[in-house]
Every structure is written in structure tokens, then in C-alpha cells.
Amino acid sequence: MSLEIANLNVSIDRIAILRDIDLTIPTGQMAGLIGHNGAGKTTLIRAIMGLLPATSGSIRFKGEELTQLAPHRRAKLQISYMPEDRRLIPELTVTENLLMPAWANHISDGEKRLAWVYSLMPEIADFGERKALQLSGGQQKLVALGRALIPGRELILLDEPFEGVAPVLAQRLTSVIGDLRGEGLTVLIAESDDSHSAGLVDQTWRIERGAVAFGRKAPAAPASHQHPA
Ligand code: ATP
């Protein structure tokens, strides 16, 4: 199992935001995390990254407990995320933006990883010397995905990757994310509905008001609620 979350609770300013989250993703699989705005998707991703502390419960990655590990130690385990907003540095070139996490995390084979990202998305290699501010919003999303892939070659958490992306670019993003399966990554895709992720994922978890409403572990619906055959 790659990611195993058990009884996870997260509070912000003493308000319980995530409640008893149980969620697992097997190694090399893709999972969807579906929920309305405010359901808690970003909070869960930030808790996995160590950007928010867990109040209680466990987050294990490949058997290792993460909850007491600082964010940079989690990054060393090759866990990474793509935030909902692109957060590129506008004045830096695409290549510099991509290499930034390698510099920040003292990754010695950054150039090799950059070549890998460019092989997955040759179109961003074409504008590698352009400043990020010169790119369209969709192009920036591709670069943001590439930037997340530089430090995260084991587990990548994508926070609403398709949000605000024009249909052609969304199709391209879907295809690139699909290619990550062949690269052996474990992937979590947060989305408000499953319109893009449905065709990609092995399993879907729905989160409502900070709790898992259904997922692989959820019990089957009672017989009385099932439609007649
Ligand atoms: P969205 O796509 O709108 O970000 P989401 O499912 O990712 O939705 P979260 O951003 O995780 O949801 O927010 C979950 C809940 O936590 C919301 O009710 C939100 O108002 C609350 N929340 C998030 N961050 C904070 C904060 N810093 N202070 C107080 N409440 C917060």
C-alpha cells in the first residue's frame, strides 16, 4: 500500500475540518478525491504534505508514519503536490520554475528529472526559456504539473488540476496524468466532480463536510435502498 490514512482529524483554529478520515491508495494506483467546494480536499492534501498538523490519527506512506515528519522530510520521500493556484514565479523562465523545487530540496539529479518532465510534456520544453508570465493559463498548469513532478516521483497530489483550464488543455492534462500510471507513480486527483478524473482513476473517494462519504472501504448500501432489478 502506498498511502494509508486512518482516523485522521485536522482542526484549523480549533474548528474540526477533517473528521475521522480513512483512505488508502495502493502503490501505482490513481484515486479520485471528489467533493464540493469547502468539503475539505485541500485541507486533506495539505495535511498529507505536512503543511497542516494532524490533530489525531495516522498518515502512513509506504509504511512510514508521516504525521510527525516536517514537510521537507516528506518531500524527501518523493511526495509532492500541485496546488490549485499555479503559483509559478512570473519573472522566472519555465526551466527555472521547474528546477526551483530541485534547488530548494537539494535534489542532485534535477537536470535528469527535468529531462524526464520534458519527455512527458515536450510542449513545455519548447517554451522553456520563456518567462512564466508569458504563458497562457493552461500552459502554466502544465508547467505547474511538471514542477510538482520534479520532487514527487512516488506520490503526487493534484489539487483541482483541471480547474479553469480550457477543454483542449484539459484533454492534454488528462493524457499526461494518465501517462503517470506507466511511470509507476501513485496519484491522488482532487476534483469537485469526477468529470475529468472518472476515466483515469482506479477508485474514487467522496468527501463531504470533512468526512469520507464513500470510498473503497464504505459499506454497501442497505438492500432497502437499492433499486429493484
Ligand atoms: P475548495 O475547492 O473550495 O478549496 P476544498 O474541498 O478544498 O474546497 P478546503 O479548502 O479544504 O475545501 O476547506 C475545507 C473547510 O475548511 C472549509 O469550510 C473552509 O472554510 C475551512 N478552512 C480552510 N482553511 C481554513 C483556514 N485557514 N481558516 C479557517 N477555515 C478554513
Image (cartoon, rainbow, N blue to C red):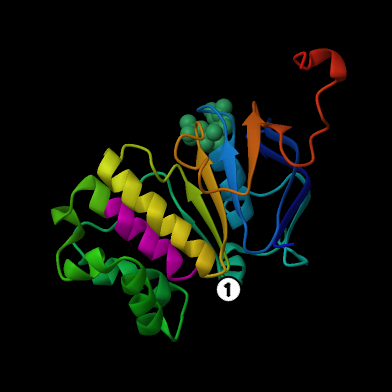
Q: Residue at x 43, y 49 (%)?
A: 83
Residue 151 on the magenta segment? yes
Q: Residue at x 71, y 48 (%)?
A: 54
Q: Is residue 122 above or below residue 14?
A: below
Front residue of 62/96: it is 62
- In the image, farthest residue toward the right: 223
Front residue of 122/49: it is 122
Prevalent SS, magenta region = helix
Q: Is residue 40 above or below residue 174?
A: above
Give the class, few, some or many, for how many residues have Cα within 10 Å of label 1's Cα (few <14, many ≥20).
some
Q: Quadrant of ligand 1?
A: top right
Q: Position of residue 113 (x, y in %)?
A: 40, 78
Front residue of 92/94: it is 94
Question: Which residues, given as a range, are shown in magenta?
Answer: 140-152
Image check: 228 left or right of 208?
right
Q: Is mark 1 within 8 Å of ligand 1?
A: no
Residue beneath label 1, please? Answer: 76
Residue 46 on the magenta segment? no
Would you identify the image quadrant in which residue 44 lies? top right
Amino acid, disc 1: Lys
